[in-house]
Amino acid sequence: MTSFDTSPQLNVWRALLALAVVFVMLATTGWTALRSHRAVTPLQASLSSWEHGSLHGHHLPDPDASPARLARFFASLTAQERDRLARRYPLAVGNMNGAPLVLRYRANRLALTAQRKVELRRMHDSQLSLLGQQDAGRRMHRYESLLRQGRQILAFDPEGSGRVAEVIGDLKRAERVSVVVPGVDTNLLTFQKTNRPYSAALGMAQSLYAAERAASPTTRTAVIAWADYTAPAGLGIDSATAMRAAEGSLRLNAMLRGLPGKAPVSLFCHSYGSVVCGIAAPGLPRRVADIAVAASPGMRVSNASHLRTTAQVWAMRDATDWVQDVPYLELGGLGHGADPVSAAFGARVLSAQGAKGHAGYFEPGTESVRNFAEIGVGAYRSVRCAREENVCREGLSDASTAGRA
């Protein structure tokens, strides 16, 4: 176990809590105003073009309309008309909840192709510094990777550190859907990793998908690696507050409401991702059957019942995870509340045997990812609890794959 007195992560949290008053002052003065003055992003430009666009002389629907309204609009079009809109407004269509999945995948391929060309030019731009050219090269190679045959990109935004979401499996035909919500330092460049691949959003989702297939080979599953929010960079002010999580929770709920079909959905929220899921909980669609958190610094509530959701709440933490030493409290907007694996919180506590540290919960072969997989396919009676009395299974029976009303 990490020493309480010497943990560098704990020292960071202590310092952040001590800066509560400073943060409040900054948040209410020019710092916030400065952050709001930004140039128009590629996604905003595409959405603006859509808002001013037309098809056969008719205005296009509001891109912020309900997913059901947008789905009806796209269903009324011919294949050629849908393709024309994707080519004309690739970023808008590729990020539009309610647009057909295949059309979103196609639009995002077009957007990625265009952004690859932008970064290729920047790589050879003599006005950029060497570091700038190297950054352009990294982004260009990431876009090339995302463009590989068979990849299904559900969302993409090149602005800033970048956002992306990818589907593994057949989302349209899935009987169970899982969504992986990662934590700090998640962005376009860290979405997938060669070293320690299962500590990155894509590797987490791939490992979970494989474990679900092993747990129930006859159940059609799909997993979404959802890095479509601006996560905090490192253990700074952003990671100790709910600002990024609040923004992410809106995006998460919008994505969930735009999913096709009625299959039950399970959320798997790692580290700061559990803060996102905690804030999103009251607004989740009823089809969300489970919220499972790992390595959580808190969910912004003192008790699971305060999440105000019909979803089952699960929690796990490995004994060697440094997050256990953070102050589980909220003070002046800093900190994220009670410990989700504590008995008082009221979550169903799962075994995380084999996880080994903060980033190991999705490693293949661990009990942690096997437990996640059993939840993902609705095999609740097969989960392994953290305590011998098996209280995490009380009152639960295996779920049907037919979905919820």
Image (spheres, rainbow, N blue to C red):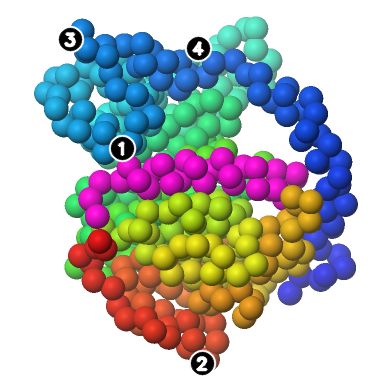
Secondary structure of the residue carrying tag 3 is loop
In the rendered image, residue 229, in percent from the top left (x then y), is placed at 52, 40
Comparing labels 4 and 3, the label whose residue is closer to the camera: 3
**Residue at 27% over, 14% down:** 59
Magenta span of residues: 236-262
Q: Please state the horizontal and vertical placement of residue 377, each as a whole percent of the image.
A: 31, 68
Of labels 4 and 2, earlier in sequence is 4
Q: Residue 56 carries which label?
A: 3
Label 4 to label 3, Cα distance in Å? Answer: 35 Å
Do callouts 1 and 4 mark residues in contact (Cβ within 8 Å)?
Answer: no
Residue type (three-letter) at the residue carrying disc 1: Pro
Which residue corresponds to mark 1? 67
Counting residues from the start of the chain, the first of labels 1 and 2 encountered is 1
Q: In this view, does 97 lie to the left or right of 182?
A: left
State the CA–CA distance, disc 4 to disc 2. Answer: 61 Å
Q: Mark 4 points at which residue?
A: 121
Q: In this view, does 144 lie above or below 302?
A: above
Kindly report the distance in space between the C-alpha atoms of the residues bearing marks 1 and 3: 22 Å
Sequence-wise, the earlier of marks 1 and 3 is 3
What's the amino acid at mark 4? Arg
Mark 4 or mark 2, whichever is nearer to me: 2
Q: For the residues carrying marks 3 and 2, which lies nearer the camera in this image?
A: 3
Please name which of the two marks, 1 or 4, marks the residue nearer to the observer.
1
Which element is circle 1 on? helix
Secondary structure category for the residue under label 4 = helix
Name the residue rendered at 20%, 65% in the picture: 402
Amino acid, disc 3: His
Sequence-wise first label, 1 or 4: 1
Q: Mark 2 points at which residue?
A: 389
Mark 3 surroundings within 10 Å by alpha-carbon count, few (fewer than 14), some (14 through 19), many (20 or more): few
Can the viewer see residue 8 in this picture?
A: no
